[in-house]
Each structure stands twice: as structure tokens, then as C-alpha cells.
Image: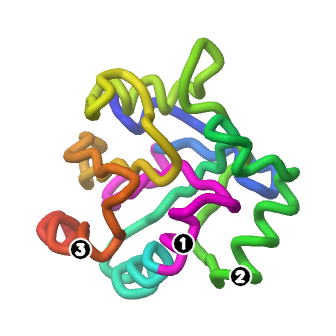
Amino acid sequence: MNFYDFSAVKMNGETVSMSDYKGKVVIVVNTASKCGFTPQFEGLEKLYETYKDQGLEILGFPCNQFANQDAGENTEINEFCQLNYGVTFTMFQKIKVNGKEAHPLYQFLKKEAKGALSGTIKWNFTKFLIDRDGQVIERFAPKTEPEEMEEEIKKLL
């Protein structure tokens, strides 16, 4: 199994196969609208704008499992991201990243790149870097600012 074996539902209700991102460098990030790390949307968008033409994709997955920091409906979350941070990268519908109901993509990501808490996501804005072949290369902690990932991203582009 690899990254391309999964699918998810975009904010507009369209189911997307991760295989649509074959040949791209991808960052997968669980997001929240009311988190101390929420300003990372700005840095993620900057990375996306800088490198999208070279093959970078960023996939945002809202999650409300950490202190109810994304309790809104999908439409509210999408609007918040666009209005407050000018997000143009792909945002998906809200999912769970931990527990029995964790989205299959996140079950896979956690298995491929264990973090400080082993098989769980510690908090919002945990970031996974995936290469052009669908291999999970690295997991970045929530406190890692998007700019700090830039050198690793450039190596894969």
C-alpha cells in the first residue's frame, strides 16, 4: 500500500483519489481554525504559491479532535481558510485522524511515519511530506513552521 491507494472528499463534495497526485510532492496536514498553530495556514499557502508550478501540492484535512478547535461545518471552515488566510491549496472535508474512526489515509500515514507519540497524531498541524512516488518521507511536528520544511521540499521537487 502507498499514498495513492486512498481517497478523500474535498470541500465541494467531490471524492478525489490520491492517485490524482502521482508525480507531485505532497504535504498532508491536519488543520484547525481555532488553534494556536492556525497562522500556519499563511506559511503553507506561501509554500504552495512558491512551489506549485514545480509540482508541490498541499492537502488540508480539518479535524476537530483536539480541544474542539474546528467545530464548524465544512462550509464555515472552507470560508474561514479562504477569507482569513487566502488558502488556495486543496482543503478536504473534516475527518478524524486518531481512534477507531480515523480516516484510512491517516491510519496509513501514522503507520508509515511514527511521531513522538508513536501511532497517534499529537495535535493540529502535524505535517507529512510525500515524494513524487507516493512514499512518506518525513513527519513534521505541529510546532514546525511551514518555512522550516522548505529545504526538504526543494530536495524532492
| Residue type highlighted by circle 2 | Asn
Helix, strand or loop status at disc 1: helix
Residue occupying image coordinates x 81% and y 47%: 71
Residue 150 circle label: 3
* Residue 155 within the magenta-colored segment of the rendering: no
Question: What residue did someone put label 1 on?
Answer: 41
- 6 over 127 or under it: above or below: above
The part of the image, by quadrant, that contains residue 104 is top right
For the N terminus, the image quarter is top left
C-alpha separation, residue under disc 2 versus residue under disc 1: 9 Å
| Residue type highlighted by circle 1 | Phe
C-alpha separation, residue under disc 3 versus residue under disc 1: 15 Å
- In the image shown, does 126 or 19 lie closer to the viewer? 126
For the C terminus, the image quarter is bottom left
Helix, strand or loop status at disc 3: helix
Residue occupying image coordinates x 36% and y 21%: 119
Q: From which residue to which does the magenta span run? A: 19-42
- Compared across the picture, whether 130 is left or right of 126 comes to left
- In the image shown, does 145 or 9 lie closer to the viewer? 145
Q: Residue 9: image x %, image y %?
A: 70, 44
